[in-house]
Image (cartoon, helix red, strand yellow):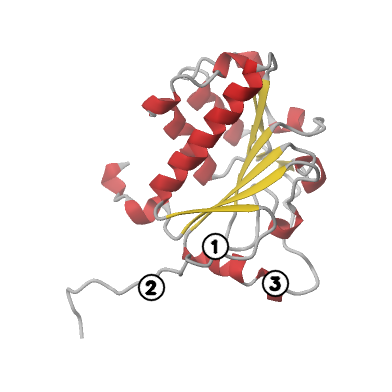
Amino acid sequence: MTTNEPYDIEEPDLSIPPALPGEVEVRGSADELFDLVAAELLIAAEQHVHLGNEFNLAVCGSSTIERFMERLMYDPDMRSFPWDRTHCWLLDDTKDASRFRRLSDTLVPHSGILEENLHDASAAMAAEGFEHVLLDVGSCGRVGGILPASVEEDTCVGADTINRSTFIGLVAMGSEVLELLNSLEESGDTPLPVQQIQSGSGTTKWYLSATTHEDEHAPWEE
C-alpha cells in the first residue's frame, strides 16, 4: 500500500551530545553549523594576522568541506577574511590532483588569496602542523581523507602531523555519523581514523548537526 504522507524520520537526540575528546558545539541545522564554523574561522584568522603573522589554514578535500569553502566565497560576513595573509593547505588528494584543482578554482579567482599561498597535498605532507585544520567525519569512521583502509594512489597527510596543529575542527553532520560517534566507546580494539585525531597541545573542537546540507536543500536549490 502506498501513501502520500511523509516518512517519519527520527533525528538523533543531541540534547546530550556524544562523549568526545575536546570541545563540542551543537547546532540545529547544517546551515547554522556552517555559520558557526565560518565565524570562528574568521575570528581565529583575524587574531593571528593582528599579531603580525600569516595564517595557515589546512582543509581536507571532502565534498562537505569543499562546499564550506565555496560558501565562504559568497558569505557577506566573510568579506573581511584576510585571504591575502593566509596560506591554505590541502590535506588529501587523488592521484590526478582533482581536489586541488577544485580548491584552486574556488579560492584563486574569488578570495584574494595569493596563488603561491595555495599548497597541494604533496606540499602539506612536508609540513610540521598548522594553525587551523578543518576536517569532516564520515559514517565509516573516516576523518578527512584518512580512511579505515588506505588507498595507495591517494596522497594524505597523516594523523601525527594533523595532531601537531593548534586547532582541529571536526565537522560531523547527519544521523549516521552521529550514531557512529555515539558508539565509539563500544568499538573494537582497532581504533577508527576519527579516534586518532586530537590536538596534542592545542584545541580539538567538534561541530555537530543532526542534519546534512543535502537534507535541507533540494537539488534545484544548489
Q: Is residue 10 above or below residue 92?
A: below
Q: CA distance from mark 1 to mark 3?
A: 14 Å
Dot 3: few (<14), some (14–19), or many (≥20) neighbours within 10 Å?
Answer: few
The x and y percentages for residue 9 are 35, 72
SS for callout 2: loop
How packed mark 2 is, by other alpha carbons closer than 10 Å (few <14, some 14-19, many 20 or more), is: few
Q: Quadrant of residue 128?
A: top right
Q: Is residue 27 left or right of residue 24?
A: left
Q: Which residue is mark 2?
A: 10
Q: Amino acid at mark 3?
A: Glu
Whole-percent x, y for residue 202 in the image: 75, 41
Question: Residue tagged by mark 3?
Answer: 185
User: Which residue was labeled with disc 1?
Assistant: 177
Which residue sits at x=48%, y=65%?
Answer: 14
SS for tag 3?
Answer: helix
Q: Nearer the viewer, mark 1 or mark 3?
A: 3
Q: Amino acid at mark 1?
A: Val
Across and down, in percent, residue 71 comes to: 43, 34
Residue at image point 52% right, 19% down: 108
**What whole-number distance in Å separates the C-alpha atoms at marks 2 and 3?**
23 Å
Q: Give the class, few, some or many, for how many residues have Cα within 10 Å of label 1's Cα (few <14, many ≥20).
A: many
Lower position in the chain sequence, tag 2 or tag 3: 2
Q: Answer whether residue 181 is visible to the viewer in this image.
A: yes
- The residue lying at 76 percent from left, 48 percent from top is 152
